[in-house]
């Protein structure tokens, strides 16, 4: 029965695989910091057991859960209440079990992206000029949605597999300009916001082979990779005197709305949290 759980609030992150997720460390830090007697745990669910697993989590007293790869689209399909952001992105990462048996779905990656840029580049505005997004995967969807929501006048997108960028452009119904991967460096021309959403530059991956020479002097460069914190792209941006924003903040900020919804306290995203997550 709903509302009959007397135990501590439970939440977690569902993925397949899930062992690499830093969300349990992040939420665990906040739970300790605010003296909340709840728990946030990693939950491994294969795609074919996702719906059944979600029902089981509700039964044992979970208040909600984050979902990550590969469940973000399935999560949306199971929801009874969908925020406008989750609908625009076409994927959900934050689920809340409603007392009436329903499922609320939000996408907080958009908030994570925007809040990270605002914190890392004070005064940043999407309206300042065109944006260039590198990559067209799941993360790119949320970032493109955020840029459009914020009134970016022109969002360019370049992806190794052109077809995937074209499909993203279809999803956002004519709001994107697709650029061939080979022209990514040229597409920096006039771009005030430049975001790498590919895995390139991550430890163990090849470097991102693009040049920032054409970017304007007031461009903000953001990498969603956060291992290492300073990717070659961000190092090159700093060397050119551009504002560089690392990717850790997006992970931290996307977690905050779920924590507040489930545990009732708005958590701080600060140096303390960054250290806790980096030191893990
Ligand atoms: P996420 O959900 O984190 O965005 P994803 O959906 O797997 O992850 O997307 C990974 C992104 O990195 C894609 O844009 C991918 O390009 P493709 O669509 O061509 O696969 C990009 N990527 C991965 N390896 C790459 C490489 N070696 N060179 C260029 N882009 C790469």
Image (spheres, helix red, strand yellow):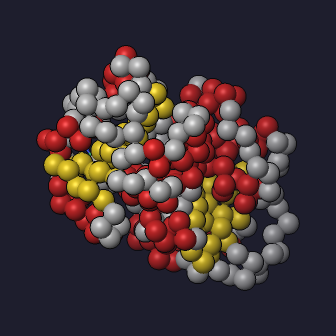
Q: Quadrant of the N terminus?
A: bottom right
Which residue is the extreme one toward the top? Answer: 239
Q: Position of residue 51 (x, y in %)?
A: 50, 74
**Residue at 70% in and 68% down:** 60
**Residue at 61% in and 49% down:** 255
Q: Position of residue 262 (x, y in %)?
A: 73, 59
- As drawn, 270 above or below 54: above
**Residue at 73% in and 40% down:** 268
Q: Is 191 in front, or is 134?
A: 191
Q: Position of residue 248 (x, y in %)?
A: 52, 35
224 horizontally vs 271: left or right: left
6 horizontally vs 106: left or right: right
- As drawn, 160 above or below 220: below
Q: Position of residue 126 (x, y in %)?
A: 47, 48
- As drawn, 110 above or below 218: below
**Residue at 36% in and 47% down:** 130
Q: How many marks?
A: 0
Residue 278 visible (yes or no): yes
Q: Quadrant of the C terminus?
A: top right
Residue 227 visible (yes or no): no
255 horizontally vs 202: left or right: right
């Amino acid at each position: 029965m709903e509302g009959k759980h007397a135990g501590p609030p439970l939440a977690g992150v569902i993925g397949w695989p899930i062992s690499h997720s830093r969300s349990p460390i992040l939420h665990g830090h906040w739970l300790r910091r605010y003296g909340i007697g709840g728990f946030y745990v990693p939950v491994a669910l294969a795609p074919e057991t996702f719906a059944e697993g979600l029902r089981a989590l509700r039964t044992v007293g979970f208040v909600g859960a984050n979902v990550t790869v590969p469940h973000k689209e399935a999560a949306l399909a199971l929801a009874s209440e969908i925020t406008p952001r989750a609908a625009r992105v076409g994927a959900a990462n934050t689920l809340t079990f409603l007392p009436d048996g329903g499922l609320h779905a939000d996408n907080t990656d958009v908030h994570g992206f925007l809040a990270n840029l605002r914190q890392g580049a004070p005064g940043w505005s999407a309206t300042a000029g065109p944006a260039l997004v590198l990559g067209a995967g799941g993360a790119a969807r949320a970032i493109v949605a955020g840029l459009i929501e914020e009134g970016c006048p022109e969002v360019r997108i370049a992806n190794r597999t052109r077809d995937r960028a074209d499909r993203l452009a279809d999803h956002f119904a004519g709001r994107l300009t697709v650029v061939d991967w080979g022209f990514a460096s040229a597409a920096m021309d006039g771009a005030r916001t430049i975001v790498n959403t590919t895995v390139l530059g991550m430890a163990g991956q090849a470097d991102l082979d693009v040049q920032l020479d054409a970017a304007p002097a007031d461009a903000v460069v953001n990498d969603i990779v956060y291992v290492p914190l300073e990717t070659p792209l961000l190092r090159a941006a700093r060397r050119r005197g551009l504002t560089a924003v690392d990717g850790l903040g997006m992970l931290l900020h996307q977690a905050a709305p779920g924590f507040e919804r489930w545990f009732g306290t708005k958590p701080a995203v600060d140096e303390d949290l960054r250290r806790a997550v980096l030191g893990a």
